[in-house]
Amino acid sequence: MTAERKTRLASFLASMMALAVGLAVFMAVSFKVEILQRLDLALFGWLSGHPGEVAGTGSADDPRMIERFEVAAEVAPLQALFLDDEEDGFFEQVPPPPADVMVLMARLQERGVKAMGVGYPLQWDDPDTLAVEAMRRVMDRMDGLVLGYRLKDSTAPAPVAAPFQRASLAYSEVIGDGTKLPVVNGIRGVAPEMGGDRSLAGFTGIETEEPDAEREYLLARWSDRVVFALPLAVEVARRGLSFDEVHVHMGRFIRLGTDGPRIPIDFRGRLDLPEVAPEREALKATAVIADTLPEDFAREGATLILTDERLLGGKADREWAERLGRVDAAIRGAPVRTESHQMKVVDRRILVGILSLLALAIGATMSRHVVKRSVVVALCWTVGLAVVLAVLIHFAQIGPMPLVWLSMPIGAVVASVWLAARERVEVVDSSQQASMATKVAKPDESKRPKKRRKKRR
């Protein structure tokens, strides 16, 4: 093969490698491979001048979005109704039986309450069947009643309970690695009340996880569903959102709806809690029955949760109630999207054509002899492409995948290095073969048999 043909072949192979790497990265980012997607988002944020404010992969199905978030200047305080150890004679017993729970919720509905949470499990030894049915009918008149339960991971798994099924998200919809989420498969307790046909549920604790004063679990995995902590489920219900509108990005955030708060979480679905709990508006639950609630308490749009704070009640329920104010403040005080701008998307066929031409151009500049030259050329291509991408983002409002473009020179360098190494091996082999041929053609004179001289007589 002539030197010219070898050079053309080397350029072609470098171009094909560059194109292959670019297309492979494009597919990986489009299908949301976690590591590459994060790197691509970081590169786009750096080039656009909006680090941490970028969403979307840049594909036609998920275009780039530049979003700006602001923390609310003021968050309305949490409103809590609590049970205590004092017996005022308003309830038949404490905790209230089904008949009293029915009256309590009916009174709250009259005040306009459409969403609320119950922060302790509703369980009775031998409840009145008619009272339970009446209570469930009253519960179903609420748009977002969220019942609280402690969850466990037992050796006898149970199917996802109906209220948790209604207030959950498919595990397949979670973005990122959800394998570190705590796993649960049942509700603690014997025959807990599941509420009506529209009742929702959230967890108030996970048996297998130790309580942490600095963090709170907001997510857990139950079979093929992701269930939510009660304060988070209450906030979703209060906003009138479907749970399918909750976006979970593991290790980054939970976003409620399109413009709702973006709650930061870690890789295990935990929320960092503020050091100081804000003041809450807390009244005895008996005030509802006595009709002594303030005028602005327990109205439509308020965040209302019923808690069990009795000394004789469950210790876990009481400790959860103590942390509730900090958890609620962190959720409702999370940044809210105030502005969003969608970037343009290049048609996929046009993009493939541009990448093909770019790959040919990159391959033509690679050297099949000098590796250092190829590295320098690739570095120049990378810097030049970064400048071009920045111009496209700022002036043409196009939202490309920077990782696709910037990875192509790397692919070309790899091909060039491989070809140069292969050529060196061929040269060495050729020189060795030539040396061996010379040795065969010219036998060693020292090994020739010496002729005997005839002796003169």
Image (spheres, rainbow, N blue to C red):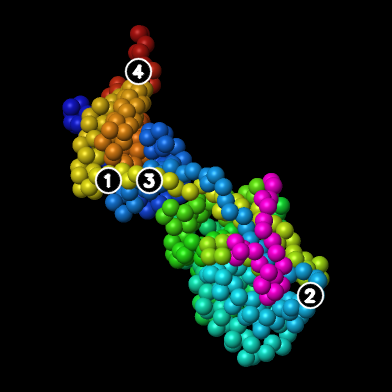
Give the amino acid type for the residue marked by disc 1 in the picture: Val
Few, some or many C-alpha atoms within 10 Å of disc 1 (few <14, some 14-19, many ≥20)?
Answer: some
User: Badge 2 is on which residue?
Assistant: 88
Where disc 1 sits, the SS reads: loop
Q: Residue 338's spot in the image, x, y percent?
A: 43, 46
Q: Which residues are magenta?
A: 275-298
Tell me the residue that label 1 is attached to: 345
* Left or right, 318 with reference to 299: right
User: Residue at label 4?
Assistant: 445
- The secondary structure that dominates the magenta segment is loop
Position of 291 relative to 31 (above/below): below
Give the Cα separation between the discs numbered 4 and 1.
77 Å
Q: Specify the amino acid type for callout 2.
A: Asp
Callout 2: helix, strand or loop? Answer: loop
Q: Residues within 10 Å of mark 2 (few under 14, many from 20)?
A: few
Instruction: Give the distance between the C-alpha atoms of the residues marked 3 and 1, in whole angstroms.
Output: 16 Å
